[in-house]
Amino acid sequence: MRLKDNSVIIQGIRPELLFAMQVVDGVYDTHGQELVITSVVDGGHDFTSLHYSGGAFDARTFYFTDKVLHSVHREIKKRLGVDFDVVLESNHMHIEYQPKRRS
């Protein structure tokens, strides 16, 4: 696992995000790729984005074929569970910690 470059800021992230990064790193490794984190609390995101509060990160995906990417996506969602949203964007995967209400 590595950061894309020194423009990626990780200070102030939620502890749950560290867990998610480790899970995603393990899934990427299983598929023969290194996890490259492209954005955490930095970058340009929607003003409501959880990036700014340290609750989201983006992961590089361009080295996966479509078929493998969808498999990786499903596996990450399964391993992280319902309190994480895992969204495939056009050029990256967005992972955020967003706990759901329990009844």
Image (tube, helix red, strand yellow):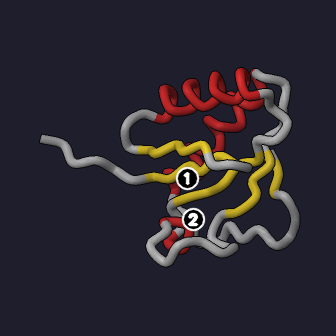
- The answer to which of 22 and 30 lies nearer the viewer is 30
Q: Residue at x 52, y 56 (%)?
A: 15
Q: Residue at x 75, y 22 (%)?
A: 30
Residue 48: x and y in percent read 44, 73
Q: Is residue 25 above or below residue 101?
A: above
Residue 13: x and y in percent read 57, 65
Around disc 1, counting alpha carbons within 10 Å, would you say few (fewer than 14), some (14 to 19), or many (20 or more)? some
Quadrant of res 68? top right
Q: Is residue 2 left or right of residue 19?
A: right
Q: Is residue 24 above or below residue 29?
A: below
Q: Quadrant of the C terminus?
A: top left
Marker disc for residue 17: 1
Q: Is residue 36 above or below residue 6?
A: above
Q: Residue at x 64, y 46 (%)?
A: 93
Which residue does the numbered mark 2 point to in the structure image? 13
Count of numbered tags: 2
- The answer to whether the residue labelled 2 contacts the one labelled 1, judged by CB atoms less than 8 Å apart, is yes
Q: What element does badge 1 sit on?
A: helix
Residue type pointed to by label 2: Ile
Residue 63: x and y in percent read 85, 36
Residue type pointed to by label 1: Leu
- The answer to which of 37 and 16 lies nearer the viewer is 37
Q: What element does badge 2 sit on?
A: loop
Quadrant of res 61? top right
Around disc 2, counting alpha carbons within 10 Å, would you say few (fewer than 14), some (14 to 19), or many (20 or more)? some
Q: Residue at x 65, y 40 (%)?
A: 22
